[in-house]
Image: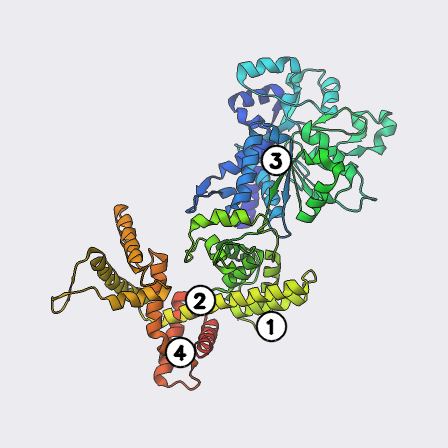
Amino acid sequence: MDLMHRLEQYRSDEEKLAWQGTFAQYFDLVLNNPHICQLSHARVYNMIMQAGTEVGTNGEKSYNFFTHDLFGLDKTLQQLVEYFSSAARRLEVRKRILLLMGPVGGGKSTIVTLLKRGLEQYSRTPEGAVYAIKGCPMHEEPLHLIPDALRGDIFKEYGIYIEGDLCPVCRQNLHDVYHNRIEDVLVQSIQFSEKNRCGIGTFTPSDPKSQDISELTGSIDLSTIGEYGVESDPRAYRFDGELNIANRGLMEFIEMLKCDEKFLYGLLTLSQEQSIKTGRFSMIYADEVIVSHTNETEYNAFVSNKKSEALQDRIIVIKVPYNLRVSDEVKIYEKLLAESALKDVHIAPFTLKVASIFAVLSRLEPSKKAGMSLMKKLKLYDGEEVEGFTQNDLRELQEEAVREGMDGISPRYIINRLSNALIKDNVCCINPIDALRALKDGFEQHTSISREQREHLLNLIAEARKEYDEMAKLDVQRAFVYSFEESARTLLNNYLDNVEAFCNKTKLKDPITEEQMDPDEKLMRSIEEQIGVTETAKKAFREEILIRISSLARRGMRFDYQSHERLKEAIEKKLFSDLKDVVKITTSTKTPDAEQIRKINDVIERLVSEQGYCVVCANALLKYVGTLLSR
């Protein structure tokens, strides 16, 4: 019964969307809400902006319209929205074809799909409602009925901008059916739908010998030629090409540069003159966003061809490189796995992160900066603090690597290999080592990987594993500390008391004897040495800590052991170095005694309850760390 109720509600909602009236009634709607006669680029821009924006901690603006589906493409999306922002204001860029260029699996198709699906939904809302002349095959704007001679007065009086002319069908209907009484012409509401071929078109290139230009511009209706006599009669022509049905909305040109030249010629007039040349008819006005996508190889070949200069001048290129932030790469795989029906296999902590580290490493270009390794670059790009470098170095790193992100391992390869590991028989959990093994095994099946590339990728697998080794040891050591947060806080407070006394050149009071003592240099150095703070740099480091405490205090915030990334690392390493022998003996022994078994069970319980492991991967983690510590 619940389904029946929902079906009834769906029909009711569909009926509410339907509207029909005369042009006179439609013009009243426009006067009350001029927004409904917006042009295609403005419609896309308003759709994106209606979803809202947010500014991240790095100062970059993100658009909620794309947030849940695209990750790590902030710069690309910023350029995309800037294009639509300019085009929405009727600047010259709206007369350009938007070309998304990037490697396979980078997100080009996803961007276009989001725009298409978004327009479908937006046209079903009051803000995005679309109205068209009833019976028009190109569902064109009803304001086109107003003669050119009157448009200037309407703009002066009402501020309504009118652009475009009637298509051949509507021009004939106005004369034959409505006897030139514009006010009586019927207008109806429409909803964009790719399936129903309304407002959204998609063209895919195929064999140039068999593909016909009519797929873009429509064709003669041979069944009506005998009735109407001539091919130039609008009633004898089907205006059902992709360019026709995409009028008022968006046209996707898949792999545009793979098309035969004759299919690209039509885009010259459509982009610059906003007109389609169809059969034996005059130029037909069309208002549509043209979005195409291609790869870098095809684009370079296109640019080098002098014959295509006219079309090149009508294209705006936006690069869509691979994501270069590990945290965003993890979100990509989380999204893809969440969409699957695979719910009974557990994915151990760090599995997706380690796979993401490998993927991002493969996309990075080596830096010329001294001491900047690929792993340091990866961490800096992901917002982490790296010794010897700051976030201010980011721009310089990005400027020296112009093509960064245009090569490397695609997300498709990673998710394919993870899927392969997940569906193996009797697998109930996969861990980072399983993931790296699956990625490595896939190199043999990857036909496009050369021998040199394979060696390079194997080195990156080793780099990713080294990084995981540190993560694994950290997780196990953390689980061995019964109350890690409390221990870290106690050690931090002790360190800060001594640092404050050192910087202010004062003494500390012994909590038991209450006698005055000098700052404990041995304690401070035992912590600072964990992160390589030298004897000569200790004073500057300690003063930096006090400045951070003061800065947070002014904003009403409290300093804790996670407030300073390097100090956090030092505190953890100090705690774990004190525990190392205990962890090593407990995890690596082959015949544990009763006390060691109790400790192992406690640690496994903590890994499961507090750190996201299952019993299987928690046991595997302990064994793995045991072998690492016993080396």
- Few, some or many residues within 10 Å of mark 2 (<14, 14–19, 20+): some
Closer to the chain start, of discs 4 and 3, is 3
Which of the two marks, 4 or 3, is nearer to us in this view? Answer: 4
- Few, some or many residues within 10 Å of mark 3 (<14, 14–19, 20+): many
Q: Find disc 4 in the rendering and name its residue.
A: 584
Q: Relative to residue 26, is residue 438 depicted above or below?
A: below
Helix, strand or loop at mark 4: helix
Helix, strand or loop at mark 3: loop
What's the residue type where badge 1 is placed? Asp
Closer to the chain start, of discs 2 and 1, is 1
Helix, strand or loop at mark 2: helix
Q: Is residue 254 left or right of residue 318?
A: right
The mark found on residue 65 in the picture is none
What's the residue type where badge 4 is placed? Lys
Q: Nearer the viewer, residue 172 or 270?
A: 270
Spatial CA span between label 2 and label 1: 28 Å
Q: Is residue 389 left or right of residue 101?
A: left
Spatial CA span between label 1 and label 3: 47 Å
Closer to the chain start, of discs 1 and 4, is 1
Helix, strand or loop at mark 1: loop
Q: Nearer the viewer, residue 167 or 365?
A: 365
Q: Relative to residue 146, is residue 614 depicted above or below?
A: below
Closer to the chain start, of discs 2 and 3, is 3
Spatial CA span between label 2 and label 4: 16 Å
Q: Residue at x 55, y 14 (%)?
A: 156
Q: Find disc 1 in the rendering and name its residue.
A: 425
The mark found on residue 191 in the picture is 3
Q: Residue at x 44, y 66 (%)?
A: 471
